[in-house]
Amino acid sequence: MRYHLDSHTLFIRGSFRAASTGIDGGVRCVSTLLAHTIKANGEMHDPQKVLENVSAGAGIGGDYFGFLTQVAGNKACVLQYDFVTVFIITGIEGKSHGSAGPIHIIVSSSEGMSDASLLETIMVATEAKTEALLGLGLTLSVTSTDGVIAASEGEERHRVAGRLTDAGKRVREAVLHGIPKALARNESGGGADRPAFFIFSRMKGDHWITWSPDRCPYYPCHFEGQSCEFCYCPFYPCMNEKLGQWAESSSSGRVWNCAGCILLHDPSVADYLKKYPGASQDELVHQIGYKKR
């Protein structure tokens, strides 16, 4: 799985088995999950046609699941909890009534899930969304455009995904943490040019940390003159054993450890990916001539 913002669209690329409640939803294999930003009150007369045009322009064809949103992609929140990555795009509307606007949630698992567990993931994410809104004292979002996509890659490892399972626990915690952050981020009207990233850390106790490339106390963590543009790697977990390796988690199972990889810290590689955000990892490694330091 990898993701990037391109103009008005958040693209999440991979080889997914996915379930979607969105436009032309269902359960099928797709290569792309996307959220396209539209103008307020615009392009909603034929949302499926809008998504078809976006996907055609990106060379995807019908091989996608997607949403339309009025929230800019750079206001999204991305939450990484081991093998689960959750993308949340939402905002506040009707402030006088204390209600949340449309809420779009995309869950991606790097560990394969059965169709039944994908559907359970949608249920868990929706339940967590409701719990988060009630905790904020907001009425439930009742818009007709809310939606959830649950997707996974790889060999099936999860046949169930209820809230007490390894997968369900991670999805629930990510949504509970992410909904308040996404609402506050959109309401603040800040000029951030990228999504916000949150990583679940077990250092000095389980907690969420906010990642930012600015004012990092650990610079340089690899070498002088490194690029920090992609400190939070959009390819994670790439599972390329030439760049990283599996490690035992302190809680349970395995996590992908790429602490020794400096691919995207190479300034020429980072500049190339900024110029060509659709580039694959293999393209970065082979065509640019990346070599480990």
Image (tube, rainbow, N blue to C red):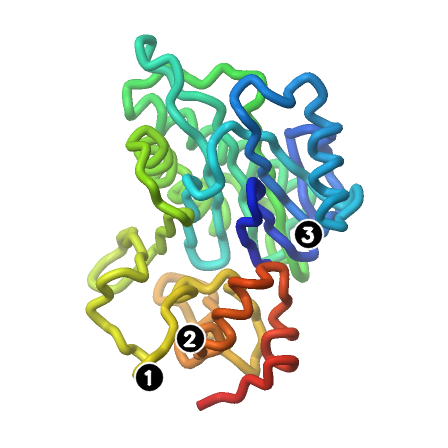
Q: Image quarter for residue 173?
A: top left
Indicate whether 14 appears above or below 30.
Answer: below
Residue at 65% in and 35% down: 20
Q: Badge 2, how many Cα within 10 Å: few under 14, some, many 20+?
A: many
Spatial separation of the CA atoms under disc 1 and disc 3: 35 Å
Q: Pointers 1 and 2 in contact (CB under 8 A)?
A: yes
Label at residue 236: none
Q: Badge 1, how many Cα within 10 Å: few under 14, some, many 20+?
A: few
Q: Nearer the viewer, residue 154 or 198?
A: 198
Name the residue tied to disc 2: 265
Local SS, label 3: strand
Residue at 35% in and 51% down: 198
Q: Nearer the viewer, residue 209 or 197?
A: 197
Name the residue tied to disc 1: 223
Query: Amino acid type of disc 1?
Result: Phe
Q: Position of residue 199 (x, y in %)?
A: 36, 55
Query: Amino acid type of disc 3?
Result: Phe
Residue at 57% in and 22% down: 145
Q: Image quarter for residue 222?
A: bottom left
Indicate whether 292 appears above or below 252.
Answer: below
Q: Is residue 164 visible?
A: no
Q: Badge 3, how many Cα within 10 Å: few under 14, some, many 20+?
A: many
Indicate whether 57 appears above or below 72.
Answer: below
Q: Is residue 18 visible?
A: yes
Q: Image quarter for residue 144?
A: top right
Residue at 34% in and 55% down: 200
Name the residue tied to disc 3: 16
Query: Amino acid type of disc 2?
Result: His
